[in-house]
């Protein structure tokens, strides 16, 4: 059975989803860093870039948002642009995944996207929805294909398309749901969500009525707004999590804040009345997340190295362009032979890799470097094991075949910042590189800089001393290991070199200047 834990504190809200007491999904939202995914804005086009078939749109955030031509609603082309596989994608990441699906909409092979300059122009006002939050130096990703998620279905007022989540596999159930929605005659597109399996007409009608009214309110608010502004904001993170994760499989929902508990009970009672009894107010003295050592697990998932029970380990490096995972035997020596030891380590690693990708919320391109295996059957079993484990992932992912070098390429839908980028920031000392120069390297740089200074006549003729200001460890190295070089400078240039320790300098920082006298 599964559980949902909602931990609320004045500065942040955290939601953990546990399956058999193991955390498989973790979300955190801080008041100082709100999410805009799913929110609808009245934006103003700043620049249209024909060369990129994209535009920058001001929606009131610090950085302009990015709008691709394929994310613009175009009259007469909407149906052709709807991806036929759209209905088979599940909303694994909740409203974020639903909105992101519009980014996957590609033109039909017989359709051609018009040039973006023919669709929009600078200064034009648009209704847009945020599909991705700003990340790093990039602004938000937006779309004009509005999607409004409900409990059982997603309403898409800008297209006419009917689909059912691929996770609803029973064909008779898929047909039943499609016929029910057709009978409702929605004024727009509809996708039945996984949570809609088994839903009756009344539930679907209730969802559609609510979302249709919401769309009318959005349109009215948009028309009344003057200038760039927020038109509609997505519900709070804990309610989104319940809307998308709460099901019959969840045994209980624990909320440790009284005010949030009342809000959750009201929300669940309104949209999922049968599950209302699962919501409980946690009032024990022991912190909620300590019930399953969740904070310990989160700290473990922020580390670079993750140990396996056998003694092996995996190393996870997150770069801007991709995530690289390396598998190592570590302390595991096995019992039979080397090939069997390697196979068992790789097999154990598949489960931990899937777990770490989910809890860390790694996205984009992922490369897994398994330990080289000789037998083809072992390679196939490892790939199959990884695929089985990734089936538990609620985010869309694709796994490619294993290369001859034992590398597996895969992709995972990036819907929100990773755990590391959410909870951490680049080290101010190394500026995010993850390493610093050796003191010997810095000392050699200082000597080369002194040599350059001595090759140029000093501006002040009375200057006779070159002063070096640097970190204490670098100064110690200069005095102990580079004495000959310094004495050579002094003898050959009739000058002196003075090294001054600056306690506030970091190892790589130094400054060279001339002193008179």
Image (cartoon, rainbow, N blue to C red):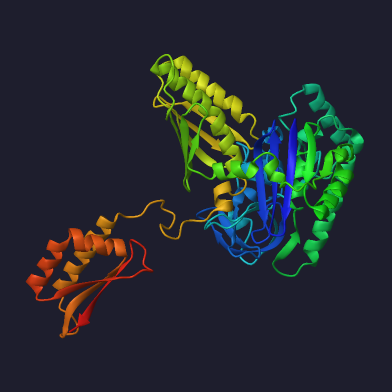
As drawn, which residue projects farthest toward the front? 285
Which residue is painted at 14% across and 72% down in the image? 455
Is 222 placed above or below 399 here?
below
Q: Position of residue 468 (x, y in %)?
A: 25, 71
Q: Closer to the camera, 285 or 99?
A: 285
Q: Quadrant of residue 488?
A: bottom left
Q: Closer to the camera, 134 or 180?
A: 134
Q: Quadrant of residue 10?
A: bottom right
Which residue is painted at 80% across and 67% down in the image? 224
Residue 112 seen anywhere in this rendered image of the structure: no
Q: Number of callouts in the render?
A: 0
Which quadrant is the N terminus positioned in? Answer: top right
As drawn, which residue projects farthest toward the right? 202
Which residue is painted at 54% across and 30% down in the image? 399
Residue 277 seen anywhere in this rendered image of the structure: yes
Is 46 placed above or below 35 here?
below
As drawn, which residue projects farthest toward the left? 492
Which quadrant is the C terminus positioned in? Answer: bottom left
Q: Is residue 348 left or right of residue 441?
A: right
Q: Closer to the camera, 140 or 504?
A: 504
Is 326 placed above or below 78 here?
above
Which residue is painted at 82% across and 48% down in the image? 264
Is 281 placed above or below 233 here?
above
Q: Is residue 158 left or right of residue 409?
A: right
Q: Position of residue 187 (x, y in %)?
A: 83, 45
Q: Position of residue 206 (x, y in %)?
A: 89, 42
Q: Closer to the camera, 43 or 80?
A: 43
Q: Is residue 196 left or right of residue 287?
A: right
Q: Position of residue 479 (x, y in %)?
A: 20, 63
């Amino acid at each position: 059975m599964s559980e949902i834990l909602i931990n609320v504190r004045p500065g942040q809200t955290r939601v953990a989803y546990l399956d058999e007491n193991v955390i498989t999904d973790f979300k955190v939202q801080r008041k100082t860093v709100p999410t805009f995914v799913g929110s609808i804005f009245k934006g103003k086009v700043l620049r249209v870039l024909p060369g990129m078939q994209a535009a920058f749109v001001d929606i009131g955030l610090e950085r302009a948002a990015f709008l691709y031509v394929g994310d613009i609603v175009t009259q007469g082309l909407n149906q052709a642009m709807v991806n036929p596989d759209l209905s088979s994608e599940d909303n694994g990441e909740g409203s974020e995944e639903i909105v992101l699906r519009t980014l996957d909409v590609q033109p039909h092979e017989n359709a051609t996207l018009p040039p973006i300059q023919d669709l929009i122009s600078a200064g034009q006002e648009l209704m847009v929805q945020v599909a991705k939050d700003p990340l790093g130096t990039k602004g938000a990703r937006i779309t004009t294909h509005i999607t409004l998620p409900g409990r059982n279905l997603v309403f898409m007022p800008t297209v006419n398309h009917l689909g059912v989540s691929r996770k609803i596999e029973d064909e008779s159930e898929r047909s039943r749901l499609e016929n029910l929605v057709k009978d409702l005659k929605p004024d727009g597109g509809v996708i039945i969500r996984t949570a809609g399996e088994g839903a009756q007409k009344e539930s679907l009608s209730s969802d559609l009525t609510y979302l249709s009214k919401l769309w009318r309110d959005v349109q009215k608010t948009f028309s009344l707004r003057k200038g760039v502004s927020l038109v509609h904001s997505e519900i709070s993170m804990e309610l989104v999590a319940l809307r998308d994760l709460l099901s019959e499989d969840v045994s209980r929902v624990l909320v440790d804040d009284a005010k949030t508990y009342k809000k959750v009970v009201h929300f669940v009672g309104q949209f999922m009345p049968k599950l209302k009894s699962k919501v409980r107010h946690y009032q024990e003295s022991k912190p909620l997340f300590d019930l399953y050592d969740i904070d310990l697990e989160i700290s473990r998932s922020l580390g670079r190295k993750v140990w396996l029970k056998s003694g092996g380990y995996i190393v996870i490096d997150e770069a801007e362009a991709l995530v690289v995972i390396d598998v190592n035997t570590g302390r595991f020596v096995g019992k039979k032979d080397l090939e069997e030891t390697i196979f068992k380590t790789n097999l154990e690693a598949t489960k931990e890799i899937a777990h770490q990708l989910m809890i860390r919320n790694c996205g984009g391109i992922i490369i897994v470097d398994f330990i080289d295996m000789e037998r083809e059957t072992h390679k196939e079993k490892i790939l199959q094991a990884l695929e089985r484990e990734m089936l538990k992932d609620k985010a869309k992912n694709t796994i490619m075949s294993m290369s001859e070098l034992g590398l597996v390429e895969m992709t995972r839908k990036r819907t929100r910042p990773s755990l590391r980028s959410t909870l951490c920031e680049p080290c101010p000392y190394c500026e995010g590189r993850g390493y610093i120069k050796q003191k010997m390297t810095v000392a050699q740089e200082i000597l080369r800089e002194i040599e350059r200074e001595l090759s140029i006549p000093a501006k002040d003729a009375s200057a006779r001393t070159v002063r070096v200001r640097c970190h204490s460890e670098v100064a110690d190295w200069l005095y102990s290991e580079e004495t000959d070089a310094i004495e050579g400078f002094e003898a050959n240039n009739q000058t002196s070199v003075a090294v001054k320790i600056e306690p506030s300098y970091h190892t790589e920082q130094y400054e060279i200047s001339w002193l008179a006298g």
